[in-house]
Image (cartoon, rainbow, N blue to C red):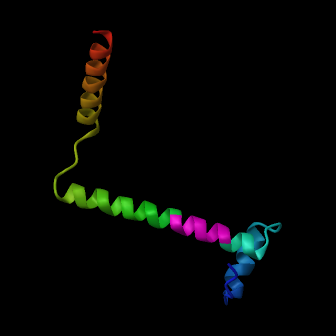
Amino acid sequence: MNTPLEINSELLQAAIALDEEASTEAIVETALREYIQRRQQLKQEVMIGAAADRGELIDGETAMNALKQKLDSWRNQASS
């Protein structure tokens, strides 16, 4: 899909300076992919923060112990 865009020339020149072989299209595509990735990461961090605020998180040691118990249970079931 072709979408005409007006891009800030200073930002575009700075991006081109970082990757002289990339085309404008490649730079914009990369920027969009990185934007999407970062926004998804931020959404996940917000969700984790909200869960922490509600007291729904557990510490790492407790989580690892629970996982080890599950693994042991599965191993015992498999060997039975």
Which residue is at the front of the view, 62 or 74? 74
- Quadrant showing the N terminus: bottom right
Pinpoint residue 59: horizontal percent, then vertical percent.
Answer: 24, 41
Q: Main secondary structure of the magenta part?
A: helix
* Quadrant assignment, res 21: bottom right
Q: How many marks?
A: 0
* Quadrant assignment, res 4: bottom right
Pinpoint residue 76: horizontal percent, then vertical percent.
Answer: 27, 14
13 magenta-colored: no
Farthest residue to the top: give it: 80
In the rendered image, the vertical position of residue 30 relative to residue 8, given as above or below: above
- Quadrant showing the C terminus: top left
Residue at image coords 29%, 38%:
60
Farthest residue to the right: give it: 21
Residue at image coords 73%, 69%:
26
Pinpoint residue 50: horizontal percent, then vertical percent.
Answer: 24, 61
In the rendered image, the vertical position of residue 60 relative to residue 12, given as above or below: above
Residue at image coords 16%, 58%:
54
The magenta region covers 29-36
In the rendered structure, the answer to whether residue 10 lies left or right of residue 52 reads right
* Quadrant assignment, res 5: bottom right
Which residue is at the front of the view, 57 or 32? 32
Residue at image coords 19%, 59%:
53
